[in-house]
Image (cartoon, rainbow, N blue to C red):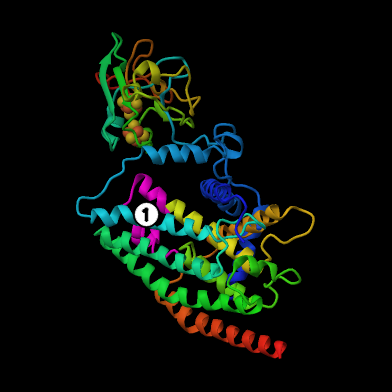
Amino acid sequence: MTSPYPILSILGILIVTLTLAAGLIWLERRLLALWQDRYGPNRVGPFGLLQVLADMIKIFFKEDWIPPFADKAVFVAAPAIIVVTVLMSFAVVPVAPGIIVSDLDVGLLFVLAMSSLGVYSVVLAGWSSDNKYALLGGVRAAAQMLSYEVFMGLSLMGVVLLAGSFNLTAIVEAQRNLWFVAPQFLGFVLFLIAGAAETRRLPFDLPEAESELIAGFHSEYSGMKFGMFFVGEYLGVILISCLITILFFGGWLGPVLPPIVWFLIKVMFFIAFFILMRAALPRPRFDQLMSWGWKLMLPLALANLLITGAVVLAWRS
Amino acid sequence: MFSVVRTIWYVLLHMFHKRITVQYPDEKPYLAPRYRGRIILSRDPDGGERCVACYLCAAACPVDCIALQATEDPTGRRYPEFFRINFSRCIFCGFCEEACPTYAIQLTPDFEMGEYQRPNLVYEKEDLLINGPGKYPGYNFWRVCGVQIGGKDKGEAENEGPPVDIHSLLP
Ligand code: SF4
Ligand code: SF4
């Protein structure tokens, strides 16, 4: 089942996600300010909304500089990779019945694969910059990806077992009676943490870590290339929020309001939660992060998968 | 793990706290009278310039942004011929005010002196001099010092006895 108007869906999702990603810059600054007893940008336009425009104009006119010691081709490709991979993932995200670019049967696997590819962007950016801070950021990103990718996939398998499908639309439909967050609460928490690590947001922004690594992997980037990393990060936040909504909170399902509105409400809620995490939590040390990932999260995810499997098996027989 | 959740909750509650931001151009903050802002030169209660052009402020200034030239009026009263402060270099440390023996130079609670052109930040004496005594209303340097100027002879200052006649033997 694909959407009746594929081009329309593609354009719609593309425009909405990109606008949302830009709008998130404003939203994040306002929300962070809200939780830090400040106002945030409130001067430009109503509620400071035009701040986004001002920021965009500024970043477009910044000098776009490629350091002479950088590996040019890779340096230029890296920011594109992150945006492309995240946008590709949006292709399989069902926003509402019928509003989906491509209803893959292995949609979930596709998303996981794409988000793993996204880490290449960070690693390559750090590597090609030929700057020790950038390199450290890249190395951290690789290590972080190794520790989090594993249980990220595993934490979702409980959902897949319950729904009996990798197809995101089918997963949503399987939640008609009960959102998966109830039987899969552990999976939800694990995925939330892995999602934050995947998007490299605080508290897992170790590859960036302004306070220790200048700006980590994008230390050498400026102008719109830097902007691409930013957009990629925000797109990642939107994507993870969409995934949480679809996998654990019943996607577009909800009473009274039209499905797309429900979907947006839920997604916005999780985006706000990601921003709240950024406002509240400190960054862990690097070894803490890795030992958490391997020694705590992975066993938990495995246990969750085993128990879910056993219960599903017992139920069916 | 619990502390993480608790932290998130407490930060969420900050939503309902009072904002600490002062919305500056609409809402001015209160600045204490001792605030170190734009520098002025004050006058005596009787309207004369306080500055005696002693150069102490210029010497004290860590960034050397005060320039002046001393001169004297026919009655022997010293005053600066020109007095120039380059506010693009001033760091508002207040040392000049500390150094001044006559309370002439004073810092005020005004900081809104932005300019588009750097030379406009160089203030001349006309820009600095105000028509009042500033923070020290009663003080009049020339009335307490022993120097003779027009309208005040030796021995006529406050708390000053008449000069001793060194040629007389009388006590
Ligand atoms: S405030 Fe400090 S820097 Fe400014 S003129 Fe006075 S002594 Fe110089
Ligand atoms: S220290 Fe005071 S009296 Fe002396 S030159 Fe400076 S302002 Fe004038």
The residue that appears at 20% across and 54% down in the rendered structure is: A69
Image x and y of residue A2, in percent:
60, 58
Amino acid of disc 1: Pro
A168 sits left or right of B54 in the view = right
Q: Is residue A102 left or right of residue B104?
A: right
| Displayed-image quarter of ligand 2 | top left
Residue A167 falls in which quadrant of the image?
bottom right
Residue identifier under label 1: A79
**Which chain is home to disc 1?**
A
Q: Is residue B2 visible?
A: no
Whether B169 is among the magenta residues is: no
| Count of numbered tags | 1
Local SS, label 1? helix
Residue B127 image offset from top left, x and y in percent: 39, 18
Q: Which residue of the protein is positioned furthest toward the left in this rendering?
A: A69
Provide the residue span drawn in magenta: A205-229
Say which residue appears at 49% left-offset and 65% top-offset. Answer: A203
A54 relative position to A97: left or right: left
> Percent from the top left, x then y, of residue A257?
76, 53
Residue ID at (23%, 55%): A70
Q: In this view of the protein, can residue A28 be seen by the observer?
A: yes
**Label 1: few (<14), some or many (≥20) within 10 Å?**
many
Quarter that holds the C terminus of chain B: top left
